[in-house]
Amino acid sequence: AAVGTSDGYLLVGVPVQRGLAQAIGQGAGAGVVLLRTPPTGPAIIASTLTPAVEQSLAASLKSRPLTDGAVSVDVDGESRQAISHPLMGSKTGRILFLPAAEPLTALVAAARLPWLLGSALLVVVLGVCGWWLWRRVLQPVDAIAQRLDRAGGGDFHLQFPESDAGAMTSLVTSFNRLMQTLRG
């Protein structure tokens, strides 16, 4: 809860099934492991990892003590950086955070749908703007250019209806005045 410039937090523990924890971990692109660290070595209590990755990590953790901060762990034969911290000041409980193996790939995967939707919207907006530009500006200019070409051949009886001018009202008015002057 936020009151003025102060924030308050309430942490409530609820049991989470392994499937839900793994789904959360896959969605985040990272893994979280809850460890018990008795003198005999760390043991995994719960995690967001798949069972195969969890077993690989467990084997890697047996051979090294965990310290606070960044640690290097082996997961499926690949060395990865992890962050280790005591669980709320506990001497035997520890949290291990495994960032995504390829953070850029995870970031791109998470941003793919918004980028696609944004790109599609941009194409639609550009298409509408292009159509409007053609209809209101380029088409009248092309019509005036064709009539000027005919007037260059001696046909001075050309006129534009003022209603067809659109955004080019002053150009159409000038063209009509020019044709009237040339007719004499």
Image (cartoon, rainbow, N blue to C red):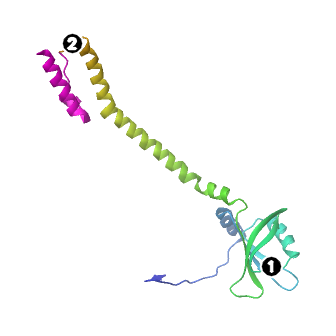
Tell me: residue 96, above or below residue 150. Answer: below
User: Does the residue at mark 2 contact the one at mark 1 (Cβ under 8 Å)?
Assistant: no
Q: Residue at x 78, y 86 (%)?
A: 92
Query: Left or right: 103 with respect to 129?
Result: right
Q: Position of residue 124 (x, y in %)?
A: 44, 42
Tag 2 residue: 155
Tell me: residue 91, above or below residue 135. Answer: below
**Quadrant of the drawing holding the C terminus:** top left
Please tell me whether residue 141 belongs to the stretch shown in magenta: no
Q: Secondary structure at mark 1?
A: loop
Q: Position of residue 175 (x, y in %)?
A: 20, 25
Query: Left or right: 52 with respect to 125?
Result: right
Q: Disc 2 to disc 1, how far (Cα)?
A: 93 Å
Q: Residue furthest left?
A: 184
Q: Residue at x 79, y 70 (%)?
A: 72
Q: Nearer the viewer, residue 25 or 123?
A: 123
Q: Secondary structure at mark 2?
A: loop
Q: Which residues are magenta?
A: 157-184
Q: Residue at x 23, y 15 (%)?
A: 151
Tag 1 residue: 66
Quadrant in the picture for residue 33: bottom right
Q: Amino acid at mark 2?
A: Asp
Q: Nearer the viewer, residue 105 or 169?
A: 169
Query: Left or right: 125 with respect to 27?
Result: left
Quadrant in the picture for residue 138: top left
> Mark 1 packing: few (<14 Cα in 10 Å), some, or many (20+)?
many
Name the main secondary structure of what is drawn in magenta. helix
Q: Position of residue 134 (x, y in %)?
A: 35, 32
Please tell me whether residue 172 belongs to the stretch shown in magenta: yes
> Mark 2 packing: few (<14 Cα in 10 Å), some, or many (20+)?
some
**In this rendering, the label closer to the viewer, 2 or 1:** 2
Q: Amino acid at mark 1?
A: Leu
